Amino acid sequence: MGRVRSSKSYDADANNSHRRTVSSLNIARTEESRSNKSSSSASRSSASSLRKDQRFQRHIISQNTSQIRVADVNEKNHQGKFVDARLLPKLDFVRKTLSQTSGSLGMITRPRIINFRERLKERKSAYLQFTVKRILAILAVIASVSAIVWFLFFSPVFLLKSSDISISGSNEWVSEQKIASIASTQVGKSLFLVSSQEVINQLNDIPGVTEAKVSKNFPNGLHVSVHAQRPAAMLKTRDSNKLTAVDAKGRVLNAVAQVTTQGIPVIEVSNVQRSLNNRAVLEAVKIVSSLSESLRARVTKVSAKTQDSVETELGDVKKTIIWGNSSQIELKKAIVAKIIDDPSKIGNKRSLDVSAPVRPILK
């Protein structure tokens, strides 16, 4: 009974407090309305103020009511009685979360409910698409590279043919056929695969070729130019009219017949093949190859019994020059140039011996 009486007294006190609050609000509103009637501008806003007062009154009443309910619940809880959950504030977080479809800024987002099977299917589909795109890209790159390689190195556009090879600089000693046989080793290749250096190296190995150049004329042309020197000397056997041209190193350029020998010294030998290994012949070839073009053109006969007794005969003045060997050849040539064409020095002498250049001898 004591507990019931205390609850009723508490309710009575709350009701009295509520009535006092309402009474004070009515008094304040009456005074405010009286003061507002004194001006015309206040009369126009009286309706608005009244509505505000009513809202404020309802707010105070609801606040007091909630306080009363909360106090009642606390009192009952304090007394060990059952708490009415219906009077507690309601907030269903689960339902709120599941019902959300937009973020805090109003942006549309994925629903909170996630279907993991669908997500797994989406991931598999995305991975499959990515793999297919990557494979297609790789195949496209391989196809492009293959097409470019085929076009540059295997297509007939850049293929070298024998008819596309042009040659210049050949002479009777370095034949065009010999140059063409070397250049034709590149026939059937793409011009990008033709080795110019390989052709040049083979051409330089030909006796008499002092310089070789190879130029590519795209899409499928090749030009070979050589600088072929004249033979240093011609080897002639006594019983044959066939001449063998040799260079300064004693290498055979070509064997020809019925060719002019003007300006090319002729050396008579018993056998061409054996003479190429003869030191005397090689010394004679080395000496005559070092002579100036004007002096070589005057040489009509060359003889070499030994490697230290090389002699040349100048047909225009009927003079013989005894060179000895090829040592100090530059000094020997300088002495010959001073004496051989000076009548005051050569006089009626028939030979000039410069085998010992510091002591030339006239005979």
Image (cartoon, rainbow, N blue to C red):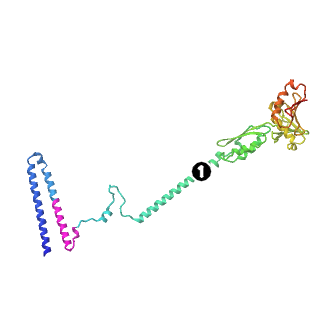
Nearest the viewer among 6 and 361 is 361
Report the label total.
1
Percent position of residue 190, x then y: 66, 47
Q: Which residue is mark 1?
A: 147
- Displayed quadrant of residue 179: top right
Q: Is residue 84 magenta?
A: yes
Q: Is residue 267 magenta?
A: no
Classify 10 Å Cα crowding around label 1: few (below 14), some (14-19), many (20 and above): few
Percent position of residue 358, x then y: 85, 32
Measured along the vertical axis of the image, is residue 132 above or below residue 82? above
Which residue sits at x=12%, y=73%? 5
Which residue sits at x=12%, y=46%? 41
Percent position of residue 123, x then y: 45, 61
Quarter of the image where the C terminus is located: top right
Nearest the viewer among 119 and 39 is 39
Q: Is residue 153 rendered to the left or right of residue 244?
A: left
Nearest the viewer among 23 and 344 is 344
Q: Name the outermost residue toward the front.
A: 358
Which residue sits at x=10%, y=54%? 29
Measured along the vertical axis of the image, is residue 218 above or below residue 32? above
